[in-house]
């Protein structure tokens, strides 16, 4: 029986999103299958940064034993990294050494590097414990985790321009607050969350003004050291679990020919709900997600405006988001919903649009839509396009531009039969949507991990600058 240690940045309601949903479902189902599962989380970040790092037992989640790292590295919270030296502080490896010898885990499965010390991976290497890393985003290759800059893929491999992208990152005091039990307890108090975020924005603005006055060479040196730190950590990974060919191509373009396997991600709520669908009457487009530039939301709105201006006005754009309402005449606004409501929302649209501008590592919503028989219009930047390429005619992959999206929308508007044909192709897909299949694939990945031997590490750390 395998003994697995999972590491992720937190649990709901403090941490949410596709990574958390995937990781929680995976470790829960592994435990249900009889595996011994442990969970490690970043714990409190003390104000006194000289305090020693410790591993402390936390409240168990059913059969899953939970531990927390007291004094982890800060969690960037997806806003980037402002003070780079705070993220590369060394710690004694002794707590990790003792923990690994005590628990004797067979595999360590990382879902992020956020909050983790390099010493954690160095000690795992010393003790011969193989490490799997699921590529939910590009953190480690990019301090923002998106590799997105000025509307397109970031090409800065030396991290020379990261200071500009990270100028609005949260200051350390706000990150320290996120690590507290009080914040976790009151995460759902919107007034508190908004107050913290507003204060963080003001502090970030002041910090940015101060940072700009520093010599450019100092800023570059800081981010160069940060890049070297994360490159070392990624070099200690035994096996990469790429969730798409897109993620594999990007990681290997930055790290070289690393050992890995492509296994699309999923979650335990997905079932085979495919059914015959008819597209008659008004065309109903669906978009799920936030309104950020990298998600391609502005590109989608502009493509819809072009459609409307050219006389194709019998359509609705259904927006499912927790952002403020849009007032365009063709928009239908919807609130955030539960998973059950999400399935119902998919059943109320004719086609899903995923217009991402960043190289999205997967895009779970595409798999969710296909499981309900809903055709998809997907940017070539979305990792889940691999599903549409593997099963031809189940959807539409466009070139990622506004004009390409507008042309695709015009095509399905003028010929609704294209959507019905796509639905027919989805119904014929030879694809197992069950979570059991995914669990088997992950187990096989664990089994094929190369045998590790405990070893003494040479100094892998490279000078930066």
Image: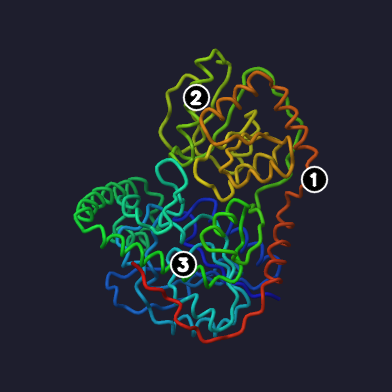
Please state which of residues 377 and 28 is positioned toward the viewer in this rendering. Answer: 377
Q: Which residue is mark 1?
A: 430
**Residue neighbourhood size for the residue with mark 1, other residues' Cα within 10 Å, grouped as few (<14), some (14–19), many (≥20):** few
Comparing marks 1 and 3, which lies closer to the viewer? 3
Q: Is residue 142 left or right of residue 438?
A: left
**Quadrant showing the C terminus:** bottom left
Where residue 320 sits in the image (x, y, percent)? 52, 35
Among the two numbered marks 3 and 2 on one chain, the one whose residue lies closer to the N terminus: 3
> What x and y, as percent, mark residue 332?
51, 25
Gap in Å between the C-alphas at discs 1 and 3?
39 Å
Disc 1 or 3, which lies upstream in sequence? 3
Secondary element under disc 3, as helix, strand or loop, is helix
Judge whether 462 appears above or below 270 on screen: below
Q: Which residue is found at the position 58% from the left and 34% from the top?
A: 353
Is the residue under label 3 in contact with that under label 1 (CB below 8 Å)? no
Residue 345 visible, this orientation: no
Residue 399 at what x, y percent from top left?
Answer: 57, 36
Residue located beneath label 2 in the image:
331
Find numbered disc 2 in the image and state the secondary structure of the residue it sits on.
strand
Label 3: few (<14), some (14–19) or many (≥20) C-alpha neighbours in 10 Å? some
**Residue 418 as seen in the image, left or right of residue 294:** right
In three-dimensional space, the C-alpha distance between marks 3 and 2, rounded to whole angstroms, equals: 44 Å
* Color scheme of the displayed model: rainbow
Tell me the SS state at disc 1: loop
Of the 4 image quadrants, the one containing the N terminus is bottom right
The residue beneath circle 3 is: 231
């Amino acid at each position: 029986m395998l003994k697995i240690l999972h590491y992720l940045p937190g649990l709901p309601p403090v941490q949410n999103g596709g990574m958390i949903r995937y990781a929680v479902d995976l470790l829960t189902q592994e435990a249900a299958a009889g595996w011994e599962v442990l969970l490690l989380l970043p714990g409190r970040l003390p104000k006194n940064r000289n305090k020693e790092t410790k591993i402390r037992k936390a409240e168990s989640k059913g059969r899953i034993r939970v531990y927390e790292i007291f004094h982890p590295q800060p969690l960037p919270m997806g806003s980037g990294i402002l003070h780079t030296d705070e993220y590369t502080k060394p710690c004694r490896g002794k707590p990790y050494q003792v923990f690994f010898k005590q628990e004797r885990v067979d595999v360590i499965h990382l879902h992020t590097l956020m909050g983790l010390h390099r010493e954690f991976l160095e000690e795992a290497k010393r003790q011969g414990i193989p490490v799997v890393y699921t590529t939910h985003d590009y953190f480690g290759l990019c301090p923002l985790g998106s590799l997105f800059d000025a509307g397109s893929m970031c090409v800065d491999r030396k991290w020379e321009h990261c200071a500009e992208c990270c100028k609005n990152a949260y200051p350390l005091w706000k990150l320290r607050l996120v690590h507290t039990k009080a914040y976790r307890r009151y995460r759902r108090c919107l007034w508190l969350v908004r107050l913290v975020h507003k204060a963080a924005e003001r502090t970030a603005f002041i910090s940015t003004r101060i940072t700009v006055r520093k010599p450019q060479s100092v800023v570059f040196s800081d981010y160069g050291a940060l890049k070297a730190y994360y490159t070392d950590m990624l070099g200690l990974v035994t096996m990469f679990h790429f969730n798409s060919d897109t993620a594999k191509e990007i990681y290997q373009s930055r790290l070289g020919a690393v050992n890995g396997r492509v296994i699309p991600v999923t979650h335990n709520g997905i079932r085979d709900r495919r059914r015959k669908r008819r597209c008659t009457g008004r065309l109903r487009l669906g978009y799920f997600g936030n309104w950020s530039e990298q998600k391609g939301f502005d590109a989608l709105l502009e493509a819809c405006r072009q459609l409307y201006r050219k006389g194709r006005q019998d359509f609705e754009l259904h927006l499912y988001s927790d952002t403020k309402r849009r007032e365009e005449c063709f928009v239908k606004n919807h609130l955030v919903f539960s998973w059950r409501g999400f399935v119902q929302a998919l059943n109320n649209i004719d086609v899903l649009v995923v217009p991402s501008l960043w190289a999205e590592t997967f895009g779970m919503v595409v798999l969710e839509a296909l499981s309900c028989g809903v055709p998809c219009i997907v940017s070539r930047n979305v990792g889940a396009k691999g599903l549409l390429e593997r099963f031809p005619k189940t959807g539409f992959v466009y070139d990622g531009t506004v004009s390409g999206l507008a042309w695709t929308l015009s095509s399905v508007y003028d010929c609704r039969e294209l959507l019905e044909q796509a639905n027919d192709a989805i119904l014929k897909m030879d694809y197992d949507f069950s979570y059991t299949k995914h669990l088997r694939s992950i187990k096989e990945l664990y089994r094929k991990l190369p045998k590790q031997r405990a070893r003494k590490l040479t100094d892998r750390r490279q000078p930066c600058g």
